[in-house]
Amino acid sequence: MRYFRPVPCPFDRPQALPIAGGPLGFAEIEVISRDGVEVLPVVAIEALWPEAPEAVERIATARPALAGIEFDRPRIMGIVNVTPDSFSDGGRHDSVEAAVAHALGLVEAGADVLDIGGESTRPGAEPVAEEAELSRVLPVIDGLARAGCPVPISIDTRKAAIADAALASGARIVNDVSGLTHDPAMAAVAARAEGVILMHAQGDPRTMQDAPDYGDVLLDVYDFLLGRLAAAEAAGIPRHRIAVDPGIGFGKTMAHNLALIRRLSLFQALGTAVLLGASRKRFVGTLSGVVPAERRVAGSVAAALAAAAEGAQILRVHDVRETREALAVWQAIRAAESQKGWV
Ligand code: HH2
């Protein structure tokens, strides 16, 4: 099998097509196989392989808004963990009022969507019973709805019952870190959401970091997401409502995480929005030499910018204000590079 990765460039470079409608473009494609990588102009590959024109079209086509989120620029998903044990902010927002206030503060800081989670999926985390998870997230979603939260709410859960109740309370997106594999009832519930995030993980949170193993991490994750997209579509979830996510830190070594971020634009060939969550994760701490997770802000922003430069549509972050500010500078510099400015 051949895989087609757009090489990002300014969208108005001669012969360039937009990546997912813009703002980045691509004039070259890396044609990747399990034997190696070849770089070719887009115009050349269309004639070479029968599957190439369709892949180019999937990469270039604009992504429609997902739960009202427009993809004319990278969007920020603010993380709200209502858990006692999340790796970087566990126990911070364990009253409903504190969690709602924190979430509204993230909106104020520039979050385009909020992701509410009641079960930590950090490496080594123990599963949480359904009732406990429900009692953590539902009052926060209700509280946000009552406060007139102006951005869509995503529920970060692997369980159908939680997603079901969250949607009934006003959540619009289901974010399942198991890619709809953990709970057989999840796909049918997710089909009612305006947006579904399919993430790749190898193993479950308890054991996933024991010995992550891939033939080729980039291509293995791509194959997994391709399969989950087909399963989701078969369950009645149209592709335009889906975003995919390679799952940084979920059964991945440092080398795996870096390989995925370095060539993140490959996932644009799936024809959906791409989300990346690198915020405060262990590899950021290792690379930046910062041990306390809540102080890994600068390294996390660097990872978010790298993902934006690879065309990522959604960045899942704890530090919304810092990411927003960094993106504004990055976008202006990218705009200066092209003649027509930022679209
Ligand atoms: N990472 C975490 C949780 N949910 N969802 C998506 N789509 N992508 C991610 O990378 C992702 C995710 C883990 O991070 P966090 O929520 O900060 O920690 P914890 O699981 O300990 O609550």
Image (tube, rainbow, N blue to C red):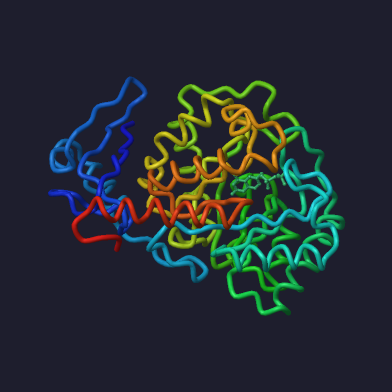
Give the camera-side residue of 296 and 156.
296
Quarter of the figure with residue 201: top right
Residue 94 image position (x, y, % from top left): 84, 57
Q: Number of callouts in the render?
A: 0
Up-down: is 120 above or below 124? Answer: below
Report the quarter where the N terminus lies: top left
**Residue 97 in picture, x, y percent from top left:** 82, 68
> Where residue 69 sits: x, y (%)?
48, 67
In percent of width and height, residue 147 lies at: 71, 78
Q: Residue 134 vs residue 141: left or right? A: right
Q: Is 32 displayed left or right of 153 in the figure?
A: left
Residue plotted at (80% across, 43% down):
127
Which image quadrant is residue 188 in? bottom right
Q: Report the side of 268 relative to 211 (left or right).
A: left
Question: Which of the pair 313/203 is nearer the observer?
Answer: 313
At x 68%, y 45%, the residue is 182
Residue occupying image coordinates x 19% and y 54%: 12
The residue depicted at 20 percent of the width and 37 percent of the height is 49
Q: Quadrant of the C terminus?
A: bottom left
Q: Is residue 59 left or right of residue 203?
A: left
